[in-house]
Image (cartoon, rainbow, N blue to C red):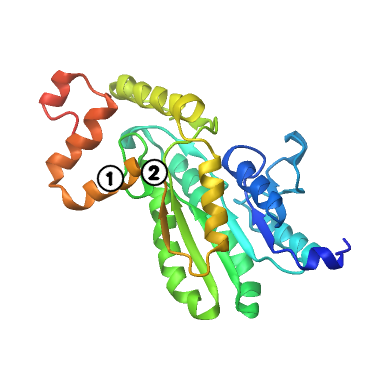
């Protein structure tokens, strides 16, 4: 693919999971603000047309990641920014979640992001320049009930990102995490293949709440896209960005409140258990 002189002056951004939702909003804004954007999708043929090329990518497969990064480097010569957005979500109690279901969460949300980072880092480090933005979650800092596997995958991503940020900063590469709560993306939620009836009612309530947030009442994806743009354009990007005052307050409560009080503040507003169950300690 031929690169024009004009294109060589545009910073190159690779955004995973850009066929819809958060990734599409982010890639679209970056393209509008002068970035040469490459988005990715597991199946680009099923995605609506976009103002940026959409490349095939399965972050769970080493060969797919290598091919995608090679295609971008071949077309643009470099990758100035990687936005790790591709992800999936699973709702289920820990007891009813199989190891395979946990592995699936880790494979996409944690190892998938790690594969992408490992693929772009050598070229960024050689140029002593690059930005990596990993889309995390409130659940990665404050794990709620019935999102244990998802929270674990995001918590692991937080740890990897923090260590990496210290390691690559001397080489001119900056790593940032953006912690957000549910946004209006319409993301589908996986469920346990072997559900435990004892958890049916509270699991259903949590699932209904998440679906309501991601379809109707959550924040607009533009909130994230603007934050990503700010991170990429900052001369000194921070390691962590928290989107929303409510999220910041909950993270602060996790750090300073006694455990019983914090548990009540986290679980009671979710309305997952009947009041009698909460009184017996079932909500803690």
- Compared to 166, does 175 lie above or below? above
Q: Quick check: 54 left or right of 237?
A: right
Task: Tell whether label 1 touches label 2 (CB within 8 Å).
Answer: no
- Percent position of residue 64, x then y: 69, 54
Looking at the image, the residue that sits furthest to the right is 2
Please name whichever residue, 215 or 35, is drawn nearer the observer in this view of the structure.
Answer: 35
| Circle 2 SS class | loop
**Is residue 112 at all visible to an observer of this figure?**
no
Please name whichever residue, 37 or 119, is drawn nearer the observer in this view of the structure.
Answer: 37
- Percent position of residue 126, x then y: 64, 79
The residue shown at (63%, 37%) is 20
- Compared to 231, does 97 lie above or below? above
Q: Quick check: 79 left or right of 214?
A: right
Please name whichever residue, 157 or 182, is drawn nearer the observer in this view of the structure.
Answer: 182
**Is residue 177 at all visible to an observer of this figure?**
yes
The circle on residue 36 is: none
Q: Quick check: 268 left or right of 80?
A: left
Mark 1 closeness class: few <14, some 14–19, many ≥20 residues within 10 Å: few
- Percent position of residue 265, x then y: 20, 36
- Compared to 278, does 105 lie above or below? below
Dot 2 or dot 1: first in sequence order is: 2
The residue shown at (47%, 42%) is 100
Question: Which residue corresponds to mark 1?
Answer: 249
Q: CA distance from mark 2 to mark 1?
A: 9 Å
The quarter in which the C terminus is drawn is top left
In which quarter of the view is residue 14 placed?
bottom right
- Percent position of residue 82, x then y: 61, 59
The circle on residue 244 is: 2
């Amino acid at each position: 693919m031929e690169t024009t002189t004009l294109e060589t002056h545009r910073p190159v951004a690779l955004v995973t999971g850009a066929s819809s939702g958060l990734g599409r909003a982010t890639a679209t804004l970056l393209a509008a603000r002068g970035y040469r954007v490459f988005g990715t999708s597991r199946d680009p043929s099923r995605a609506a047309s976009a103002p940026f090329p959409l490349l095939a990518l399965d972050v769970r497969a080493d060969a797919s990641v290598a091919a995608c990064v090679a295609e971008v480097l071949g077309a643009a010569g470099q990758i100035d920014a990687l936005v790790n957005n591709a992800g999936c979500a699973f709702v289920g109690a820990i007891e009813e979640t199989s190891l395979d279901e946990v592995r699936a969460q880790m494979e996409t949300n944690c190892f998938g992001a790690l594969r992408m980072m490992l693929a772009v880092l050598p070229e960024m480090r050689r140029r002593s320049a690059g930005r990596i933005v990993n889309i995390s979650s409130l659940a990665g800092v404050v794990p709620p009930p019935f999102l244990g596997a998802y929270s674990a995958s995001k918590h692991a991503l937080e740890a990897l990102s923090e260590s990496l940020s210290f390691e690559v900063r001397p080489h001119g590469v900056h790593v940032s995490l953006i912690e957000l709560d549910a946004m209006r993306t319409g993301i589908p939620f996986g469920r346990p293949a072997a559900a435990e009836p004892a958890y049916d009612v509270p699991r259903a309530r949590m699932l209904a709440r998440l679906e309501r947030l991601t379809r109707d009442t959550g924040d607009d994806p533009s909130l994230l896209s603007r934050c990503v743009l700010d991170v990429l354009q900052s001369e000194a990007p921070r390691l962590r960005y928290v989107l929303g005052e409510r999220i910041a307050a909950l993270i602060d409560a996790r750090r300073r409140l006694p455990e019983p009080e914090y548990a009540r503040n986290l679980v009671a507003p979710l309305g997952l258990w009947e009041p009698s169950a909460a009184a017996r300690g079932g909500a803690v």
